[in-house]
Image: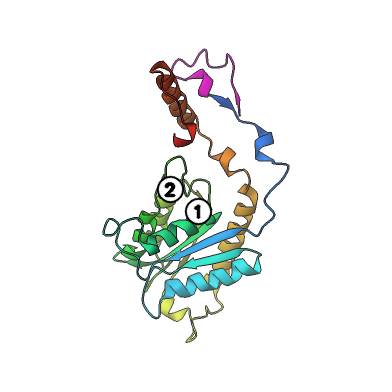
Amino acid sequence: MDAISGAARDLPNVLDSALAMPDQRLLRPSRRPSHPPRLLMLYGSLRQRSYSRFLTLEAARLLEAFGAEVKIFNPSGLPLPDDAPETHPKVQELRELSAWSEGQVWSSPERHGSMTGIMKAQIDWIPLALGSVRPTQGKTLAVMQVSGGSQSFNAVNQLRVLGRWMRMITIPNQSSVARAYEQFDDAGRMKASAFYDRVVDVMEELMKFTLLTRGISDALTDRYSERKDVAEKKDLAEKEGNSVDLDAM
C-alpha cells in the first residue's frame, strides 16, 4: 500500500509513514493460486461414534466435490496444552497442517453449554504468532456444532470468538445440528434433512470465500498498527546503532 502523504496532518495521533491508502489493485491480483483450495478440518470428540467427526466427514465429501483438497486432523493423542513440549509429534502435525491450509472447518459437540475441551485444546496448540509468521491470519473459517438435544448455538458462537482472535476470516453462515443422534445412519452418513442442506450451504460458502480471498489475504490483513510497530522498532534500533531484522518483527 502507498503511504498517505500530507493527509495525516489533522490526525496528530497517527504515524504518517505507517498510514497507507487502501488500493483496489492489491485486492484484484493479476494471478491467483491455481492449485485446489487447501482446507483443514478439526473436530472435537474422541468417541467411537462421534457425531462431530461424522459431520466433519460429510462436510469433507462436499468440499472435495467442490474441488478442494481436504485434510482431517485426528485429535487422538494430542496432549493438553502446556503438558508437553511443542516438539510433540501430534503438536507438530497439527501446526504443519494449519500452516498448509488456506481455510479451516471447526466442528465441535456442545458439552455443558460449551465447545469441548478436545476442540479447545487443538485451537490452543495453534499459536497466534511464530516469530514473524501468523499461522492463521487471513485464512478462511467455517464453524459447526452438534448437539444432543434441541438446537443451540453456544459452541459455534464461541468458535467464532476464537476465529476472530486467531485473525481468521470467519464466513457468515454456520451449521448447528440438533439431536445429532437422529441425523446420522448406522454407517455414520448424514441423512437428508434441512440440517444437511445447511451443511451444503456452509461448505459452498466456505469455498467461495476461500477462492475470493486466496492470493489477497496479505493485503486484507495488512494493518496500520502492525506497520506502526515495525516502524517504531526500526527507528529505535537505528538510533541505538543496531541492525534491524524486519522478518523477526
Label 1 or label 2, whichever lies nearer to me, is 1
> Looking at the image, is 151 positioned above or below residue 28?
below
Q: Is residue 158 left or right of residue 105?
A: left
Disc with the residue nearer the chain's start (1 vs 2): 1
Query: Which stretch is magenta?
Result: 2-18
Image point 39% across, 56% down: which residue? Answer: 123
Outermost residue, left direction? Answer: 83
In the rendered image, which residue does mark 2 sit on?
166
Q: Quadrant of the C terminus?
A: top left
Picture coordinates of residue 166, whole percent (x, y) = 43, 48
> Looking at the image, is 68 positioned above or below residue 163?
below
The color scheme shown is rainbow
- Specify whether residue 5 is painted magenta: yes
Q: Secondary structure at mark 2?
A: loop
Give the residue type at disc 2. Met
Name the disc covering residue 99, or none.
1
